[in-house]
Image: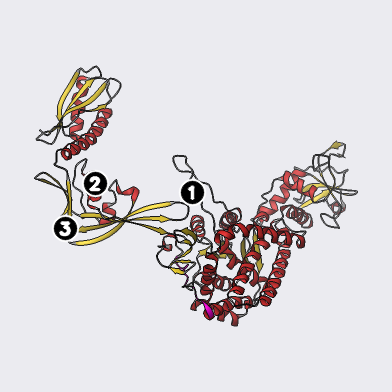
Amino acid sequence: MNKLENPIVVIINDELKLEVQTGRTARTGVIAYVKVLNGKLIHSDEVKLGTDKDRGRFAARVLAKASGVDPAAIEEALLQLAVLVEKQFSTAQSTGGNQSQYVSNDEGTFTVIGTATTTLANFGAKIVREVIEDDGLTEARYLDIECLQNGETLEVTVPSEQFQSMNWVIPKLGPQAIVESGYATRDRTREAIQRVSTDVVTQRVFIHTGWRKLDDGWVYLHAAGGIGTQGEDKNVSVDLMRSDIGSYELPSPPDGEKLNQAIQASLATLDLGPRNITFPLLAATYRAPLAEMNPADQSVFVEGKTGCQKSSLTAVFQAFYGRKFSFKHLPGSWVSTDNSLELQSFAAKDAVFVVDDFKPTGTKWDINALHKKADRLLRGQANQQGRGRMTQEGAARPSYHPRGIIVSSGEDVPKGQSLNARMVILSLKKGNVDLGRLTEAQENARQGDLAQSMAGYLQWLASQLDELRESLPKRQEELRTQARERLTEVHDRIPENVASLALGWEMFLRFAEEKGALTAEDAESLWDEGWGTLVKVGQGQEPEQESQDETERFIELISSALSTRRAYLDTPTGTSDPSLADYSGRRFIGWQVEGGVYLDPNAAYSMAQKLAQEEDNPLTTRRETIQKRLKDAGLLAGYDKDRATVHPDIGGKQRRVLFLKPGVLGEKTGPSGPTGPESASG
């Protein structure tokens, strides 16, 4: 009998324990003892720990002598015993100069102990490479395993956390790959593979674009490698196919006349259409690589009817990051899932990420789901924050958010005032895009001229990143202050959006001037034109914001309800009940009084919400919040000190109402209920 070095003990419960003092027998079992804690022997027997049947028999024999013991507890203890026995037995074999040796060949993986050879599996395997996938936030490890079976070699990739269980064998190698039976055989096969893997190479692979600081300094990652201060860097490993953004591939940075030609091709995109469209798009294109130093918290949205070349236009600017991009091949689409867009935009670091074709259609649920998807992605861009999630263990999972700039297009604009304020919305009309110049720009994109301009820009930036990390946020604050002086009656985020895009435009002009593609006078002229255009674009954003203001929308809905006779106003002496409709089905919502209109808060909000829901666009702001905003907007003729309502005496009863100024609901508003002029014929 092979002896174990030390006794092995496994506790069954508070009174009983399993103990093994001997080792393997000729019948490959062990002699196990069941004792009480005071050392009294209850039962001893030989048991084959690796088989369910023998473990069950042993448990039954113990139960016959020790009542009140859970048989499952005994079998669980035997399983633990099997692992401990195998572990100590292997150790005992190796300490006497008879160390286990593993061999991997075309007949399988073997363990050799002395002169006895035991087959573990019918295939050979060794780890040849450890791959660390780095997304800039987390690391995932994979093992590349070279397997040999029946004379054929196959390399498979296994997540490192799945390797130890050996459950990858059949999924990766097929049903012909067999690990021999036996409780510990899987673990010994795992050990065998690790033992024979003596020359494992560790490789770090980046699965995102954008800036990373490596040993040789800052490098901008893309599908073909990296771009640093010395130009092309092919020593860095990048695999963007893992993130489904494999077309982000830049050429080697040009220099001299070739670079100047590429810069001129870049500037020519300003002539694709109206400058209030092309300036923001080109500025965003060169703003995106600055996100590492100063994150961009706005996106650009091009809206217009079908046929106005939205996709073709945005594709030209996407092609600055890879010549394979076209209107038929863009990195993002609104038909993709929320999680897919979130991960793609996270991987497209310091780059433009076009999401094409926002087109709410289908059922009410489909439309709301698309708007919700847009809100999640674009709000993540604005807040630089992803959706928080938890693991099953209650720990925080990494959250993903866009790390470049999202440029989107669609036939409609995602709804919500606060969301719209986080976007620069550009309205494109049919005929705005010059089709001849568009064809030229598309050809420049296919030839890689636009990507060459971006590659040169990135090489120029690479040596300045540490300095720009300090200077760019301060410069954007200066530009924001200047924008606020000219944009005095707009949403507070609009000057920020203008300043951020202007920062990209300014950096591009500095680059073009330093490289000799522009004279100082030309650069200054283009700056003045670009800055003025971006400010005008900011001024044009306000009507879009107002259309999304839910307070204004509330007023519009109430006015519509009155004009379409869905609701009515009574006189102060009337007897209308807000809970009832009149003879024609109209709802009472308030009273017409001298000096304005009294609105019943509950009835009016209910009426507005009913109409909003019929438009598949329900009000999302609470009734109390709308009341406060009516007060702040100066639309109320009177209000209490701490509330937006007043409580006049109407029909002998004090009521709490909203007191709107004359004309807020329309100049011709008057009593329209049962006691008003319209009721005479009734």
Residue on which disc 2 sits: 191
* Mark positioned earlier in the residue sequence (3 or 2): 3
Foreground mark, 3 or 2, reads 2
Q: Quadrant of residue 493?
A: bottom right
Q: Is residue 587 left or right of residue 4?
A: right
Q: Residue 398 has which mark?
A: 1
Q: Residue at x 40, y 56 (%)?
A: 133
Q: Is residue 604 magenta?
A: no
Q: Secondary structure at mark 3?
A: loop
| Whether residue 580 is visible | no
* Majority secondary structure in the magenta region: loop
Q: Position of residue 332 (x, y in %)?
A: 51, 64
**Residue extending furthest bottom?**
436
Kind of residue indicated by mark 3: Asp
Q: Secondary structure at mark 1?
A: loop
* Mark positioned earlier in the residue sequence (3 or 1): 3
The quadrant of the image that shows the N terminus is top left
Range drawn in magenta: 246-256
Q: How far apart, in angstroms, are the residues tagged by discs 3 and 2?
A: 18 Å
